[in-house]
């Protein structure tokens, strides 16, 4: 789509075609140089491993435009590392981290006219994607791969301001099991979450809170975001145990809480029962798309716990302001997280 035709002030989270993408091919045991090409389809064998057995992984990141026009990325090295953790889980070839960051920068530069303006609150969403493209019949890794990076302009997560969402705990569906692929950002992890998400939305909830598959008791995560709560004045989040995606926003929130706020944080098992006690005063979820999203209520069967009259909690708001302030270059980035392009 032509950038002049885009209403940057009214964007959602929908696919919009931008001009250029990055593509690199893995053949005979190595990645080629990779290049920026016009965004568009490519041919793939019907026997490709991704099409038959779901051998694919991806990442999600954002480029932002600062007040004075500078373009920034947030912790791209973390996405580069996580891509390779996912690659190892699906027996895919790793992609050099420095080359990953350079390729992301090249794609953003090539699509810079699609970065929403600072005052729109939007971002250029970046989608690195690696797929097993070689044909294969038996269940085994492909011998050829494609690594693609494309971009899509997206609006702010809160077009009408910072608002709390309503979530439902599922006793029916799980997202990941011990020993599975929950900690990796594999394409197949997401296909199974579409039906639960659709059903809960029909009932009026924004997303599902998934519990651990072994006990159906401890919180894993929320659809495509990590979970946090304030319990007994401590900031708590489920500990990483192989079934949860290690979110980069999650990691950043813990670091902000430990260094910028006088709040104790804990990574531990959180029983869903604790969320229905008065000792739990706030809850929110975190992610590249969701940033920090306050949770207004949590429902399990017929029981609903409402937090703070469905208004964002005090600590949630503080963490949101700090994170967004650092990302948007409005607060000094003591952590060295923001990378200018
Ligand atoms: C399942 C899942 N959990 C958590 C997250 C949050 O991760 P991050 O903060 O790195 O975006 C995401 C989004 O990437 C996700 O898909």
Image (spheres, helix red, strand yellow):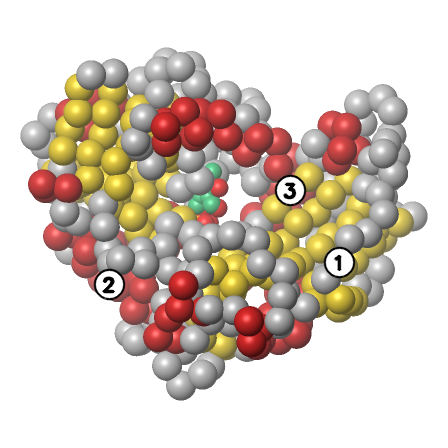
Where does the image place residue 159, in percent across and percent down from the top left? 32, 59
Residue in the image at 45% along x and 21% along y:
174
Determine crowd level at label 2: few under 14, some 14-19, many 20+ residues with C-alpha closer than 10 A: some
Name the residue tied to disc 3: 57
Q: CA distance from mark 1 to mark 2?
A: 38 Å
> Which image quarter: residue 109?
bottom right
Of the residues under marks 3 and 1, which one precedes in the sequence?
1
Whether residue 117 sits left or right of residue 183 in the image: it is left
Secondary structure found at label 1 = loop
Name the residue tied to disc 1: 40
Determine the residue located farthest toward the right in the rendered image.
Answer: 28
Of the residues under marks 2 and 3, which one precedes in the sequence?
3
Between residues 25 and 311, which one lies in front from this camera angle?
311
Where does the image place residue 286, in percent across and percent down from the top left? 35, 47
Determine crowd level at label 3: few under 14, some 14-19, many 20+ residues with C-alpha closer than 10 A: many
Between residues 117 and 283, which one lies in front from this camera angle?
117
Whether residue 138 sits left or right of residue 267 in the image: it is right
Secondary structure found at label 2 = helix
Residue in the image at 39% along x and 75% along y:
118
Name the residue tied to disc 2: 321
Decide if ligand 1 comes within 8 Å of the CB at mark 1. Answer: no
Of the residues under marks 1 and 2, which one precedes in the sequence?
1
Q: Which mark is residue 119?
A: none
């Amino acid at each position: 789509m032509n950038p002049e035709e885009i209403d940057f002030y009214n964007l959602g989270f929908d696919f919009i075609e931008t001009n250029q993408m990055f593509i690199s091919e893995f053949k005979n045991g190595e990645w080629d140089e990779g290049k920026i090409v016009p965004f568009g389809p490519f041919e793939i064998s019907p026997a490709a491993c991704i099409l038959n057995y779901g051998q694919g992984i991806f990442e999600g990141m954002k480029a932002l435009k600062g007040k004075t026009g500078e373009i920034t990325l947030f912790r791209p090295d973390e996405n580069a590392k996580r891509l390779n953790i996912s690659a190892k889980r699906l027996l895919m070839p790793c992609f050099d981290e420095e080359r990953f960051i350079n390729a992301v920068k090249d794609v953003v530069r090539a699509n810079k006219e699609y970065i929403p303006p600072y005052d729109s609150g939007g971002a250029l969403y970046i989608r690195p994607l690696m797929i097993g493209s070689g044909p294969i019949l038996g269940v085994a890794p492909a011998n050829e791969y494609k690594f693609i990076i494309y971009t899509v302009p997206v609006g702010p997560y809160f077009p009408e301001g910072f608002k709390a969402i309503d979530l439902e705990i599922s006793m029916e569906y799980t997202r990941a099991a011990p020993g599975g692929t929950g900690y990796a950002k594999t394409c197949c992890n997401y296909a199974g979450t579409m039906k639960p998400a659709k059903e809960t939305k029909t009932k009026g909830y924004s997303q599902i809170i998934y519990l651990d598959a072994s006990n159906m008791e401890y919180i894993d995560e929320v659809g495509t975001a990590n979970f946090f709560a304030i319990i007994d004045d401590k900031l708590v989040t489920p500990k990483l145990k192989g079934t949860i995606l290690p979110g980069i926003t999650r990691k950043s929130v813990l670091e902000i809480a430990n260094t910028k706020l006088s709040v104790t944080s804990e990574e531990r098992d959180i029983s869903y029962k604790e969320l229905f006690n008065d000792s739990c005063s706030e809850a929110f979820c975190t992610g590249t798309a969701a940033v920090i999203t306050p949770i207004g209520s949590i429902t399990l069967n017929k029981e609903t716990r409402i937090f703070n009259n469905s208004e964002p909690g005090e600590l949630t708001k503080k963490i949101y302001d700090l994170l967004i302030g650092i990302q948007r270059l409005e607060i000094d980035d003591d952590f060295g997280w923001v990378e200018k392009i």
